[in-house]
Image (cartoon, rainbow, N blue to C red):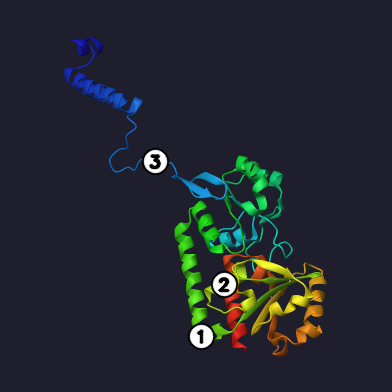
Amino acid sequence: MLFKGVFGGFGSKKISVLAVVLVLALVTAACGGGGSGKPEAGQQPSQEPASRTIKHAMGETKITGTPQRIVVLTNQGTESLLALGIKPVAAVKSWIGDPWFEHIKEQMADVKMIGDETQPNVEVIATLKPDLILGTKVRQEKIYQQLSAIAPTVFTENLGDSMIDNFKLYAAALNKEGEGKAVLDDYNKAIEQTKAHLGDKTKMRVSLARFQPGKVRVYYKNNFAGIILSQLGLARPDAQNKDDFSADITQEQMTVLDGDVMFYFVSDRQGDTGAKKTAEEWLGSPLAQNMNVVKTKRAFVVNEPIWNTSGGIIAAKLLLEDIRKRFDSL
């Protein structure tokens, strides 16, 4: 009798139709108004980006998803990003260049420069609103807490001889481990191809040295170039066959630089010539004239950023190309 009271002016068929419509509307509202939160058949539930915890030199850092706005505080790290196809929003200045090394400057177009490795500008970094900061304990330990307050921050322990481990750490932080593996596979392939190309020339004793204004340093095995020479199986002079980084030497100790071949880098910055003058003075001295590498004219000046100051995966591959060309000329 309810329907009759409500729809008293309508015929029985019309009442029946309206009653069905009303019931269906009430059922639909009941099902849809509160919502069960369950997706309909065929629909995928929405998911938050996955989070992961990265262990690094300063502890552990939680990172969610794939970072898009990255600030990098090492020259080595800059090359890691570029090798992974990532352009940082900001980076520290290259040690040589204005402001970037020659071999990466085209890839670094429009990247903001934020100081150098020893003194990055924290205030400017904060204004860039990064979602990841990559640095190193050996350079920026004192400002780690400030950086962590801005964005998730991941630090390597050091630089120089740890390029591969540092690259893997950054790739993990960037959520690019698959891409990182491909880059390292390509690098390892280049090592093996270069090693095969050199053949018996790997038995030649390779000396490494760095000339700075008024100072000369012998480079042993645990540095960027030294590690690559070891990967190629190249021999080192007995005086340099040490698992150390480097050591300053006096001119009277110059014979420790002798070998079958010497590669040396000259550390002059823009407009400076002090390191070049030191190299000319030492290699032109009577003591140097008795060295095998000088007498055979096998003392070669090489590119400082590629062989030393960059320390990254891009420079490493360029160094392999340089080694191959240099030995082809011997």
Residue 75 relative to residue 287: left or right:
left
Residue 253 relative to residue 61: left or right:
right
Badge 2 vs badge 3, beta-carbon distance below 8 Å: no
Distance, label 3 to label 1, CA atoms, is 57 Å
Badge 1 vs badge 2, beta-carbon distance below 8 Å: no
Question: Label 2 amino acid?
Answer: Ile
Instruction: Say which residue label 1 marks.
Output: 199
Tag 2, which secondary structure? helix
Distance, label 1 to label 2, CA atoms, is 16 Å
Looking at marks 2 and 3 on the same chain, the residue that comes earlier in the sequence is marked by: 3
Looking at marks 3 and 1 on the same chain, the residue that comes earlier in the sequence is marked by: 3
Give the residue displayed 67% in from the left and 43% down from the top: 127
Q: Is residue 178 above or below residue 259?
A: above
Instruction: Say which residue label 2 marks.
Output: 228
Give the residue displayed 74% in from the left and 78% down from the top: 254
Question: Label 1 amino acid?
Answer: Gly
Looking at marks 1 and 2 on the same chain, the residue that comes earlier in the sequence is marked by: 1
Q: Is residue 231 above or below residue 108?
A: below
Q: Position of residue 172 (x, y in %)?
A: 49, 54
Q: Is residue 155 above or below residue 14?
A: below
Q: Residues within 10 Å of mark 2 (few under 14, many from 20)?
A: many
Q: Position of residue 131 (x, y in %)?
A: 57, 46
Q: Position of residue 24 (x, y in %)?
A: 25, 25
Question: Label 3 amino acid?
Answer: Ser
Residue 138 relative to residue 86: left or right:
right
Q: Is residue 325 above or below residue 220?
A: below
Tag 3, which secondary structure? loop
Quadrant containing the C terminus is bottom right
Instruction: Say which residue label 3 marks.
Output: 46
Give the residue displayed 48% in from the left and 71% down from the top: 188
